[in-house]
Image (cartoon, coloured by chain):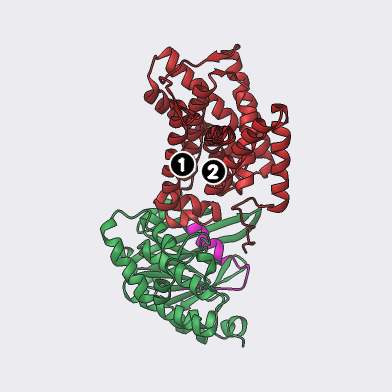
Chain colours: A green, B red
């Protein structure tokens, strides 16, 4: 499946000529890509390539040049909290857990934009079914959780906001291989249940294996794209990101 | 009862009254610090503006106590929100010291704006019939009881809002780190405005009660009371709601007791010495916690 063959109605997110500046230095030089409904798209690249900036721009956390269109609507002048309400959930770099709130309060906060308050209880059950650890720790402060539990909570919050598009920033960061495996399995499950995923990763090997399509980002430019399988086999990707 | 105990009980009641007023103001300092890590030095003057709103409502509108209180709280809340929107919001990403200097400027503006409109001290009329009961030698005034109960009531409501409601969860999330609060779908600016409105509204309530207890008001009345409320917040652990209340009652208690048992000119000197010692022993205040560094 390639973007050019897809119909307009299949495009969930379209990023065009995205430019971002940090303190006057250009961090993204006109990046363009699309995400289709139901896909897992991954952006891989080294530290500082601009992956996080892309997600922050989409979520409205930072100003940018170019355009971001979600389900046909431009997100350019929409504030970050409303973008959540439109259906984009963002698990940020470093997880962004509120350490002074309980697990339960962290989850509850993420339901702020939801109009269907009646269905929230069912979503708690869903999150606790996926991550039984969070149920055990629901009255504990977020700051007392282990790194893996915090990542579960961060993904749990994204589920509570009921996004149709899930932005994941380095979910494997700082986790043991076993936990990384579990998180990736959960991401695939969430995707199968109908949520589109845009995954930013340094762990290129794992990310490419679950991705429908992938883009390689190098110093603010997209230099390669293809299906996950194609990029896994690409010699340039192998050398730069898969350890030869 | 022995005279010593009666005197002691009498002073305890006075301490509770003063502590209640300090607490209502201290909450505003601590809430704003909690969410913006900024000391709103104009807050004592918002308390003063509240007392003048009370005067306006009671004298010019001729309103009775409850509408006067509500109108004063509403007016002060609006002033608080306007101060944040006009003076602090443009500086949200500026160095903290810029915001603090601006807060001092806003305070001086409020004092002199009020001075221009009201060059002479004003008298707040007695809005409540003040009955005094004698209970075993301790004289209790209805005004004292109302001030203490009303303040405690407001503090319970605030505590409920902060610890039990979605708005309170959002406020506490902002106090941890506001960067990712919008990713939860929470409108950051609205929650900050609500925080200022609540803090200023409580200061307005304190202005009304202070005006009833000590009816002569002037544009500079907020300075010393504001400092004391600020110190209460620091003693309790700035940023901590329950700490601010505890700190305020401690300060009120120390002040009243020093004045009761020593020459009254010793009051502030002894009270502040004790508070400084307390800060030496507990640098983060009674309920304050040193913040672990976030990555």
For this orientation, the residue located farthest to the left is A118
Residue linked to disc 2:
B245
The reply to whether residue B27 is visible in this rendering is yes
Q: Please determine whether, in this image, residue B175 is positioned above or below residue B292.
A: above
The quadrant holding residue B252 is top right
Residue A44 painted magenta: yes
In-front residue for pair B121/A158 = B121
For this orientation, the residue located farthest to the front is B2
Residue linked to disc 1:
B155
Q: Residue at x 56, y 57 (%)?
A: A19
Q: Which mark is residue A181?
A: none
Cβ–Cβ under 8 Å for marks 1 and 2: yes
Q: Helix, strand, or loop for circle 1?
A: helix
The quadrant holding residue B290 is bottom right
Q: Helix, strand, or loop for circle 2?
A: helix
Q: Please determine whether, in this image, residue B213 is positioned above or below residue A192.
A: above
Give the chain of mark 1.
B
Q: Residues within 10 Å of mark 2 (few under 14, many from 20)?
A: many
In terms of sequence position, does the residue under pointer 1 or pointer 2 come before the other?
1
Residue A223 painted magenta: no
How far across and how far down the image is residue B37, in percent? Answer: 61, 47
Instruction: Please check whether the numbered discs 1 and 2 fall on a single chain.
Output: yes
Q: CA distance from mark 1 to mark 2?
A: 8 Å
The C terminus of chain B sits in image quarter: bottom right
How far across and how far down the image is residue B90, in percent? Answer: 58, 38
How far across and how far down the image is residue B264, in percent? Answer: 69, 27
User: Is A129 placed left or right of B22 in the picture?
Assistant: left
In-front residue for pair A115/B265 = B265
In magenta, the rendered stretch is A42-58
In-front residue for pair A230/B36 = B36
How far across and how far down the image is residue A153, in percent? Answer: 45, 69
User: Is B260 placed left or right of B13 in the picture?
Assistant: right
């Amino acid at each position: 499946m390639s973007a050019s063959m897809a119909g307009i109605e299949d495009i969930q997110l379209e990023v065009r000529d995205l430019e971002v500046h940090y303190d006057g230095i250009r961090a993204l030089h006109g990046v363009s890509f699309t995400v289709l409904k139901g896909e897992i798209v991954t952006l891989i690249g080294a530290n500082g390539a601009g992956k996080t900036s892309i997600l922050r721009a989409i979520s409205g956390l930072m100003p940018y040049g170019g355009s971001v269109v979600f389900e046909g609507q431009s997100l350019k002048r929409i504030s970050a909290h409303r973008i959540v309400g439109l259906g984009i959930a963002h698990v940020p770099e470093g997880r962004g857990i509120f350490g002074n709130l309980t697990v339960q309060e962290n989850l509850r906060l993420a339901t702020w934009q939801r109009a269907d308050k009646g269905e929230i209880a069912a979503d708690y059950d869903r999150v606790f079914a996926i991550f039984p650890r969070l149920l055990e720790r629901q009255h504990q402060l977020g700051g007392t959780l282990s790194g893996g539990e915090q990542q579960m909570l961060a993904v749990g919050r994204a589920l509570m906001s009921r996004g149709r598009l899930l932005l994941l920033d380095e979910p494997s960061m700082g986790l043991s291989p076993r936990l990384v495996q579990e998180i990736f399995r959960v991401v695939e499950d969430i995707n199968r249940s109908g949520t589109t995923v845009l995954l930013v990763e340094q762990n290129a090997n794992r990310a490419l294996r679950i991705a429908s399509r992938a883009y390689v980002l190098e110093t603010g430019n997209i230099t390669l794209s293809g299906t996950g399988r194609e990029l896994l086999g690409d010699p340039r990707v192998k050398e730069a990101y898969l350890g030869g | 009862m022995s005279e010593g105990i009666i005197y002691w009980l009498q002073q305890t009641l006075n301490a509770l009254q003063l502590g209640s007023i300090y607490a209502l103001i201290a909450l505003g300092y601590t809430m704003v610090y909690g969410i913006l890590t900024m000391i709103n030095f104009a807050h004592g003057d918002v308390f003063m503006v509240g007392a003048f709103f009370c005067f306006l409502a009671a004298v010019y509108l001729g309103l009775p106590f409850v509408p006067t209180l509500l109108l004063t709280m509403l007016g002060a809340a609006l002033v608080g929100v306007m101060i944040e929107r006009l003076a602090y919001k443009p500086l949200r990403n500026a160095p903290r010291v810029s915001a603090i200097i601006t807060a001092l400027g806003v305070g001086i503006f409020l004092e002199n704006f009020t001075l221009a409109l009201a060059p002479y001290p004003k008298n707040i009329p007695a809005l409540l019939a003040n009955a005094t009961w004698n209970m075993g030698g301790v004289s209790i005034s209805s005004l004292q009881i109302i001030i203490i109960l009303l303040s405690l009531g407001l503090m319970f409501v605030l505590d409920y809002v902060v610890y039990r409601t979605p708005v309170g969860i959002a406020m506490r999330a902002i106090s941890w780190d506001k960067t990712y609060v919008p990713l939860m779908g929470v409108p950051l600016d609205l929650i900050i405005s609500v925080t200022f409105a609540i803090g200023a509204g409580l200061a307005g309530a304190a202005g009304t009660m202070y005006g009833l207890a000590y009816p002569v008001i002037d544009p500079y009345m907020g300075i010393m009371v504001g400092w004391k409320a600020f110190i209460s917040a620091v003693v309790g652990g700035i940023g901590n709601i329950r700490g601010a209340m505890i700190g305020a009652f401690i300060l009120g208690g120390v002040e009243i007791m020093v004045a009761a048992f020593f020459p009254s000119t010793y009051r502030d000197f002894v009270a502040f010495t004790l508070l400084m010692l307390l800060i030496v022993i507990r640098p983060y205040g009674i309920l304050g916690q040193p913040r672990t560094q976030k990555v």
